[in-house]
Amino acid sequence: MTQASPRLIATDLDGTIVRSDGTLSTRTVAALARVEQAGAVLVMVTGRPPRWMTEVAAAVRHHGVAICANGAVVYDLHTDTVLHAAEITPDVVAETVARLRALVPELRFAVEHPTGFVFEDSYDLGRWDAEALGGRSVTAAELVGHSGTKLLAFHRDADADALTEKAVEAVGDLVTVTNSSGRGLLEMSARGVTKASALAELCAEHGIASGDVVAFGDQLNDLPMLTWAGTSYGVANAHPLVLAAVTHKTSSNDDDGVAKVLERLFPTTNAAS
């Protein structure tokens, strides 16, 4: 592969192409459109659930495919439909919650599924209201009776990296643990499910090798994808471990870092200024 003609572009959303104010710039939207116009595959690879993809899908004019929930859900942006979901079974949810609650009693839990999520009464996200985000409050006993695409555990005062490391040691044999917010919010998928596993499966379906993939990211949940892709970029605002792992670096999410790279990879006379 030459870097000028990748067959697939995989990019994280929040912190990577989505700016700090929650928007996509006109320049980034135009750069993303170039990917499919050039005949390459565009894949959004995010920790977001599918229900949070509506505005992004509209902004990119329903171009591409999305891998949501850190690899647990494959979502078609063209048709706004879930193509595949890999869920954590209720018995694994229950055992994971029990171990983590014993380890860090202050943790509070929620379970995501493709169309919504349930959360404990005491699940407190601080500035975000869980109910306003589409959640439904349930008892702790009810919570562990649900399967889900993602199990969430929140501790508002914990150090993100230290909490993640502790959780990996405690439940890494049950689920895949990561963090994408820089806060004390653990994100857990079914064991072996990552952004990389879902992207590799999608690429296999299209006959695309990892060497033909260029990936962009900023957080720990992006690391599997970034190390799997043949070419990887970390935005300037990325976690230090991401910047240490990628093959290239670009400007921050607020400075159209991904767009700048895509404009070089897919040149056109209609380049954004």
Image (cartoon, rainbow, N blue to C red):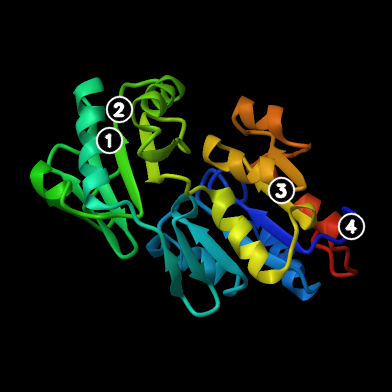
Task: Tell me which amino acid carries mark 4.
Answer: Ala
Query: How far across and down, in percent of the image, does residue 220 sit?
Result: 54, 35
Residue 104 visible, this angle: no
**Residues marked 4 and 2 touching at CB (< 8 Å):** no
Dot 2 crowding, Cα within 10 Å, few <14, some 14–19, many 20+: some
SS type, badge 3: loop
Dot 4 crowding, Cα within 10 Å, few <14, some 14–19, many 20+: few
Q: Residue at x 63, y 33 (%)?
A: 237
**Residues marked 2 and 1 touching at CB (< 8 Å):** yes
Task: Tell me which amino acid carries mark 1.
Answer: Gly
Query: How far across and down, in percent of the image, does residue 37 sit?
Result: 77, 75
Mark 3 or mark 2, earlier in chain: 2
Q: Which residue is drawn at 38% across and 64% down?
A: 51
SS type, badge 2: loop
Dot 3 crowding, Cα within 10 Å, few <14, some 14–19, many 20+: many
Circle 4 residue: 4
Circle 1 residue: 126
- Residue 44's place in the image compared with 36, above or below, is above
Circle 3 residue: 229
Mark 3 or mark 1, earlier in chain: 1
SS type, badge 1: loop
When asked about the image quadrant of residue 185, the answer is top left
